[in-house]
Image: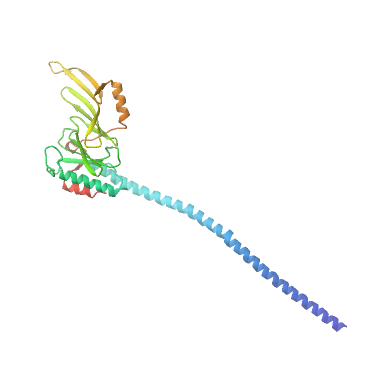
Amino acid sequence: MKRKNMKSIVSIALCSSMMLLSGCSSFKLEDDSSLSSIDESIDNKGISSSDDSVTDKDSSSNGDATTQKDISSNSDSTNNKDISSNSNSIDNKGNSDFSASNSADLSKVYTAFADYLENNPLGYENNAGDFKDGKYYVYTLEYVDEDNTPDLVYSDISGVHGSNIYVLRYLDGKVVKSGPFGSYGYTSFYEKQGIFCTSDSGMDVEGTYYSKLTSNEDYEYLCKEVTTLSFNDEGEEKGSETKYYVREKEVSKDEYTKFVDENCKGEPKKWSGYENENNYTYINKDSLNELRNKQ
């Protein structure tokens, strides 16, 4: 009986041990499976999104900061350098600043200007290609009319103050020459408006004249202010009379002033080639080749 009971107890113990082992094995598998799925969930969601978030955030903030800092410093350095060099060029040559974003088109324009200056008379008293000694005519590039294409303004250096001024424009694929502008006094133009203002003075007449470029080589008079002086027998001025005109029609001073204010915006830019006092570029074969190669 004891032996049989002992055998039964041993059997029960073995069964219990097997069940426990079986249960532990089952739990371990379930635990591994659960951990695997949890790990996978963390990897796929938590860690991945967190890493992405951190990476994006760090990259974005640090990258932007670095990029902005680098770009800012580089841009400042580059811009200052470029502006400085361009300013020197502007001061020395009198040329306006032109963007190279449409360099292909501008190159075509500059070449057309150079070809025109080389193959056509520059003024009344010389032949095509006659630049005198290469230091007789001067030019600058300016924005005179309303479009975004630069124009070429030139004159001889012997003209009285602001006189004998011409404008070359590139219209519909060809060069158009307008002028001369100016007289004994000064000449200025309103940028990107195509309007010239010329002062003139003589023995007994002083005047200010406004004219506007047309779609061809012509220009039309807009308005003028003319003062006539009177003198006594000794040549002393004894009086004056000023009249105002808008398109050749006499108007009051107020009407004239209003017309000028409405049609001429901003401050005009003076232009004078007289003795090349403004250090413009001389027109000669070398400068024309440089103009052709300008970007």
How many numbered circles are shown?
0
Would residue 176 be found to the left or right of residue 61 on screen? Answer: left
Asked where in the image residue 121 lies, by quadrant, the reply is top left
Residue 205 placement (x, y as % from top left)? 18, 23
The quarter holding residue 263 reads top left
Eyeballing the image, is 214 above or below 2?
Answer: above
In front: 274, or 141?
141
Q: Position of residue 196 (x, y in %)?
A: 24, 32
Asked if residue 279 can be seen in this view, the reply is no
Whether residue 48 is visible, yes or no, is yes
Seen at 21% across and 28% down, the residue is: 199
Q: Residue at x 18, y 20 (%)?
A: 229
Residue 267 x %, y %? 30, 32
When the figure is inspected, residue 207 is found, relative to residue 31, above or below; the finding is: above
Quadrant of the snapshot with the N terminus: bottom right
The x and y percentages for residue 176 are 21, 40
